[in-house]
């Protein structure tokens, strides 16, 4: 397949170019899981997929618990929907614990320490309470458990993976923790056989991220290659594969053609945030550069116009308010510049404050 065609198809399947979703939870549910360790960036990532969505809209969905933030893949922070959180955690938990095992040992954490820490967390968060990371660290210290730096991080992550805690509503700009049961009510759909859960998760990924390879999925999900290949085989009536000249199989959902396509979005400009799913969900092809002399390693946040990456951007603050500072890798046409200005205006509407465009020279 042509690389540009692959990126265009991904923009549609990821619903950047397709018709936007009506709610934040709809977007997260479609994608399965959305990387979210950079909270502000992840909110913009979701907003670009939701109709007329603002920063406040995403924040409210998070505060209500429509979406949950916890460690679930690779391992790092991700958004999940309330309905998906338990079964996806149960699917990926063994693999993420295995990935963390070396660090657990290095931090001198064993089952006994984890059990004591879990007891502290449960007590500190009982009755619907929420606590900041620092407040939980203080409770651990009072209980005689050394908790700072990576050791604290892995105590918290272990409890997240075991469905004890997750992020609660923010307190100002600070993240809090809450009991998982308070944020994610138990439902009948939580108990799924391994193969059934794996098939559903693979299908979600293929439908929302395709075209993609087995390597893309297994790195994104942390799940075993053999099991993932078996799931793809079981899903052959729901997905299709295309083998390119290198023998690489690209999988895409057959219902991708049914996604309402908005040509104005496909050919428009996107300010992709750091760790957007269009970047982190793939291992090989991530961007198609518009200018041959540009370097992909210079891109932290990509500017994409008509599926081609034309530069990078970042948010800055000026005396007049927020600005989008862009570094272009080459000249833009008048139409492309207009599309970029539209994207900056869209970012300003997301912030609730008009944003200005600031062009910077490539150094």
Image: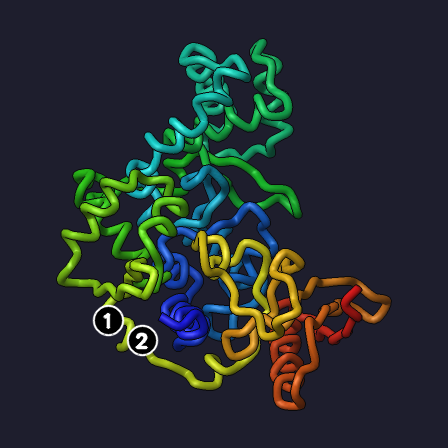
Crowd around label 1: few <14 · some 14–19 · many ≥20 (10 Å): few
Q: Dots 1 and 2: beta carbons under 8 Å?
A: yes
- Please say if 193 is above or below 114: below
- State the SS at label 1: helix
User: What residue appears at the point 57 percent right and 21 percent down from the top-left corner?
Assistant: 151
Crowd around label 2: few <14 · some 14–19 · many ≥20 (10 Å): some
Seen from the viewer's position, the closer of residues 207 and 247 is 247
User: What residue appears at the point 24 percent right and 45 percent down from the top-left corner?
Assistant: 198
User: What residue appears at the point 20 percent right and 43 percent down from the top-left corner?
Assistant: 188
User: What residue appears at the point 74 percent right and 75 percent down from the top-left corner?
Assistant: 357
Picture coordinates of residue 353, whole percent (x, y): 70, 71
Q: Quadrant of the N terminus?
A: bottom left
Q: Quadrant of the C terminus?
A: bottom right
In the displayed orientation, state which residue is furthest to the front.
Answer: 245
The mark total stands at 2
Quarter residue 260 falls in:
bottom left
- Please say if 194 is above or below 231: above
Whether residue 83 sits left or right of residue 310 in the image: it is left
Residue under pointer 2: 259
- State the SS at label 2: loop
Residue under pointer 1: 255
Q: Distance from label 1 to label 2 (Cα)?
A: 7 Å
Picture coordinates of residue 195, whole percent (x, y): 18, 42
- Please say if 89 is above or below 153: below
Q: Which mark is residue 235?
A: none
């Amino acid at each position: 397949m042509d690389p540009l065609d692959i990126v265009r198809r991904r923009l549609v399947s990821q619903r950047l170019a397709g018709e936007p979703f009506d709610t934040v939870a709809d977007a997260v549910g479609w994608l399965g899981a959305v990387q979210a360790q950079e909270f502000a960036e992840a909110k913009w990532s979701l907003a670009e997929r939701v109709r007329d969505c603002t920063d406040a809209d995403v924040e409210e969905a998070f505060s209500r618990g429509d979406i949950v933030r916890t460690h679930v893949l690779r391992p790092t922070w991700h958004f999940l929907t309330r309905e998906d959180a338990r079964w996806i955690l149960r699917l990926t938990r063994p693999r993420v614990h295995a990935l963390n095992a070396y660090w657990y040992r290095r931090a001198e954490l064993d089952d006994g320490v984890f059990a004591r820490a879990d007891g502290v967390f449960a007590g500190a968060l009982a009755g619907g309470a929420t606590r900041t990371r620092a407040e939980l660290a203080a409770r651990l210290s009072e209980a005689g458990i050394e908790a700072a730096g990576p050791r604290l991080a892995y105590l918290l992550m272990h409890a997240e993976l075991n469905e004890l805690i997750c992020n609660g509503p923010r307190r100002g700009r600070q993240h809090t923790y809450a009991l998982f049961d308070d944020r994610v009510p138990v439902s009948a759909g939580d108990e799924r056989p391994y193969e059934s859960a794996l098939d559903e998760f693979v299908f979600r990924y293929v439908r929302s991220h395709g075209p993609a390879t087995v390597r893309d999925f297994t790195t994104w999900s942390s799940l075993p290659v053999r099991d993932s290949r078996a799931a793809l085989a079981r899903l052959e009536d729901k997905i299709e594969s295309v083998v390119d000249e290198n023998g690489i199989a690209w999988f895409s959902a057959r219902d991708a053609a049914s996604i309402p396509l908005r040509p104005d979005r496909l050919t428009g400009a996107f300010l992709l945030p750091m760790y957007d799913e269009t970047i982190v969900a793939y291992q090989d092809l991530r961007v198609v550069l518009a200018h041959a002399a540009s370097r992909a390693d210079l891109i932290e946040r990509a500017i994409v116009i008509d599926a081609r990456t034309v530069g990078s951007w970042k948010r800055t603050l000026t005396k007049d308010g927020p600005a989008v500072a862009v570094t272009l890798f080459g000249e833009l046409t008048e139409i492309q510049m207009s599309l970029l200005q539209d994207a900056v205006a869209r970012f300003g509407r997301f912030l609730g404050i008009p944003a200005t465009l600031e062009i910077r020279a490539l150094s």
